Image (cartoon, helix red, strand yellow):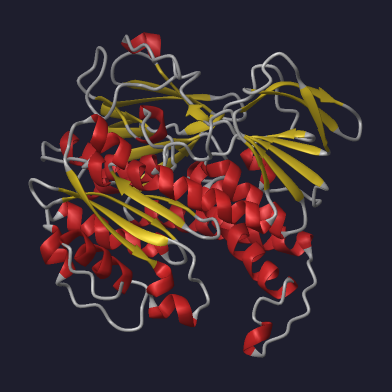
Amino acid sequence: MNRYDVIVIGCGPGGYHTAIRASQLGFDVACVERAAQPGGAGIRSGCFPSQLLLHASALYDIARTAKHAARGIDCVATLHLARMMDHKAAMIDRMSRKTHGLLRAQRVRLISGHARLAGAGTVIVTRTDGTQQTLSAAAIVIATGSEPIPLATAAFDHARIIDSADALSLDRIPRHLVIVGAGAAGVELGSIWHRLGSRVTLIERSDRICNWLDAELAATLQRALIRQGIRIRLSTEVVGLDRRSDRVSVQLRSAEASRTTSTVDADTVLVAIGRRPSTAGLNLSSVGIQPDAPGALPQRKPQGGSRGLWVVGDAAGGPMVMSKAEDEAIACAEQIAGLPGFVNYAAIPQVLYTSPEVATIGKTEQELRLAGVRYKIGRYPLGANANAMIRDTPEGFVKLLVDASTNLIAGAHLVGTGSADLISQVAIAMEASMICEDFARICHPYPTGSEALRQAAMAAGGWMMHA
């Protein structure tokens, strides 16, 4: 069968969720994937394996540093890196097979090969053996994901100069890992390898790490990373990499000494300066589409010469997170079916699985000030939370930003253990247009970390109970 109602190009979070939802709505769907396994970068070389190694490295770090000695628990830790990587590979394979099973259960046909457009409604798939298959559909969805951006002065060699996918599969612990870019990938991957024994240096051209975060949040995380032993050089640009047989010399120029350069030697350099949409090779000119400078395509609407060409996920630009891709996928399939699918971009949470965890949603203080929005702050320190005291994780805070004119939550910024789970409560409140007063009156169990959200909501109203 070569004729479908919907063809999805790419089988990552944006792609397979579009395919599943479209099939649920009664469409005949094919999903084309060029990789050997479905799941996309998020499952194979992004969020999922990162979280696996962050969890494993945290367990090792707790044992190695005897963090629970005061509780009467002593541990002897031995690291078997190869076994850790084998477990990660097995879990990725398991998740990919699960994704394949979901597609099969939803009657989506998975087709292996490289897809390119051949005019409105037509896709040509080239298999690994060189044979080709022509598919046609009323609606085509581009969900091809993203790829790491290399330095302009040095390409990836995937040995000494590596990308984020390489950093999740190293067969050795680097003596000195220099990371270019202190964004999400930089701080998470730096945390993994620092816990496993590497000396880690983050190089960031901005004046703070993770510069899209609320400034107070970023500063708290930065202090925590420095206390853990990660070195951070801000306002510093990498101007060159000199690869040797056993190391890489990294040439740096700081904003304070713009006329001089310094050199740092590393045995491995991870370039984590961001990702770009992976849209090359799609033959977009055949449907009259021109990507923007970073390679992104217009979002989630019929595009170009065909009413049925859509774009979701990282290929559409915006925050490159799996949750956003899933939301766009569901909305896309529903809009193809004529339903009012939508995405609330103001309520998409983002998480850093560092120690402490960081979670954010909605507007920052800077964004509200620039927009001229009057706002109230509800801030609660985790050091006052009973659960944080029990778990000996007092570092961090919850900060709610509340629109002063409507009393709606405009943003939330959390740093501390459990933030990744707590942010979902705020997402629900924002989606439901819950005013802060109502949020403050939701009963929470004691002693839990979730009580911090209630106290922050109380604080925004001026009546915090556990100051």
Q: For the N terminus, give its image quadrant.
A: top left
* 170 or 239: nearer the viewer: 239
Please state the horizontal and vertical placement of residue 354, each as a whole percent of the image: 54, 56
Please state the horizontal and vertical placement of residue 408, each as a whole percent of the image: 13, 51
Please state the horizontal and vertical placement of residue 48, each as a whole percent of the image: 52, 54
Q: Does residue 178 show up?
A: yes
Q: How many marks?
A: 0
Residue furthest to the right in view is 245
* Residue at x 18% of width, y 34% of height: 336
Q: Is 435 rendered above or below residue 132? A: below
> Relative to 22, is 91 on the left or the right?
right
Q: Is 451 rendered above or below residue 198? A: below
Residue furthest to the bottom in view is 72
Please state the horizontal and vertical placement of residue 185, each as a whole percent of the image: 56, 42
Q: Does residue 28 show up?
A: no
* Residue at x 32% of width, y 53% of height: 106
* 107 or 371: nearer the viewer: 371
> Relative to 176, is 409 on the left or the right?
left
> Relative to 122, is 206 on the left or the right?
right
* Residue at x 31% of width, y 72% of height: 467
